[in-house]
Image: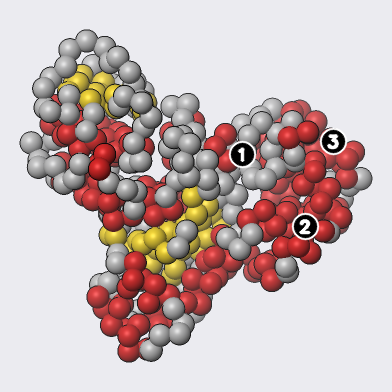
Amino acid sequence: MKGLLLRLSALDADAATAVRVIAHFEALLGGALDPVTLTRSTAGLAGCAAGLELPDGRTARFAPGGAALAGAPAHVSGRVDLEPAGRVWLERPGAPGPFDELVLEWMAIAARVLAGRPRPTRTPRAADPALVELVLSGREAVEDRARALRLLGLEPGTPLRVIAVAADAGAGSGTGRGADAGVEAVALLGRGALRGTVRVARVGSLGAVLVQRRDGASDGPGACGGQAASGSRPGGTASPAAELRAAMRERVRERSAARRPVPGTRVGIGSGADPLDAHASWAQARSALRFAVAGASEEAVADHDELGPLVLLADIPVERLRAQADVRRLGELGGPAHGERGGPATGQARPGGELLAALAAFCRTGSLRQAAAELHLHHSSVAARLAHVEKELGWRLRDPQDRFRAQLALYALRLAGNGDG
């Protein structure tokens, strides 16, 4: 059995520990993996009993001390279902631990490998927060920033992008605590979501991710010179928005299938920049983050480049946004009095609820049926919600001008709710 890297119950949540959790499972995946090794190792790592059932009928259940357990679990504190059958679980007395969700995700990844499915090929590396903060600062000397980049394993001469990750309070593991942004970043990126060199740290209340792709082969012809590829800037690097949205969709789908809270994770992506100007990409990432919607898989990732001139809305003071008539009425419409059933943890768009989710989907797609497909609803249900919005706001959403007005009000409401990111 692989040696344990850490005992999770004694540690606080941070990105470095989350990466060590992933490294533990990567080590298992690199060896002769079998159900007994995976389950016994996971139980020891988590400090509580663990079990698995594979689609082919193989089972295993172990105590944290390494002893095999018989019978059915007495108390399942967390689980992830496998497809087409099977599951992995932890049996912790009381509330789940701060890393149980991440442990279960990676135990499920390893179980899927045992069942014949491929696994992620890249793991993000936790970085020294002090070095990352130095790189992201525009006030430090160029020499100091260049040295910090080298210590992080990044090249001062190769463009990079900065990504900001927020973990909204009340989402996360469902323990009643706000999730750690660094852990959420690692949980998302640990799925192999990004190519290239990836460094993760917690900076203030946000997770900061530095992404650098040295050869540019994955980015298209415009990655590091020449004609710019779609989603990239000349001299920059291609946007990872599509990769991150795919990872977010997979995570939301798995959580929903297992009846677990949808992660309240929001992601903002800055433009490609010279590494010595990483502070500019960081500022753009935090600005884009304000446009992202926790719990809405298609809008949980916001890319500064894709937003275009809409980013200018972020320069308007929050008080002015909230005072605007359309924004105020739209916020009232999406409140609890109009049937909102929950925040990000239930999968509803923040700060709206069902009505605003339907409005956002329709404005984004321009099609009632596409909006319904995105929301997994019948088109008549979406039509009824849009009719309610039209009645309350006095809009005709088939009119392009009114639909643009609604979209603008939605962005403003989102910015007002997300503050400074």
To which residue does mark 3 refer? 387
Mark 2 surroundings within 10 Å by alpha-carbon count, few (fewer than 14), some (14 through 19), many (20 or more): some
For marks 3 and 2, give the CA distance: 24 Å
Q: Nearer the viewer, mark 1 or mark 3?
A: 1
Q: Is residue 77 above or below residue 400?
A: above
* 68 horizontally vs 299: left or right: left
User: Residue 414, how many percent across, how many down?
Assistant: 68, 54
Which of the marked residues, 1 or 3, is nearer the chain's N terminus? 1
Residue drawn at (34%, 48%) of the image:
13
Residue drawn at (39%, 55%) of the image:
182
User: Residue 387, how many percent across, how many down?
Assistant: 84, 36
The answer to whether one can see residue 400 in this image is: no
How many marks overall?
3
Mark 3 surroundings within 10 Å by alpha-carbon count, few (fewer than 14), some (14 through 19), many (20 or more): some
The answer to whether one can see residue 147 in this image is: yes
Name the element at disc 3. Answer: helix
User: Residue 372, how many percent across, how many down?
Assistant: 68, 35
- In the picture, the disc for residue 343 is 1
- The quarter of the rendered structure image containing the C terminus is bottom right
Name the element at disc 2. Answer: helix
Name the element at disc 1. Answer: loop
Residue drawn at (67%, 67%) of the image:
314
User: Residue 318, how many percent across, how many down?
Assistant: 72, 63
- The quarter of the rendered structure image containing the N terminus is top left
Kindly identify the amino acid type of the residue bearing the numbered disc 3.
Ala
Kindly identify the amino acid type of the residue bearing the numbered disc 1.
Gly
To which residue does mark 2 refer? 322
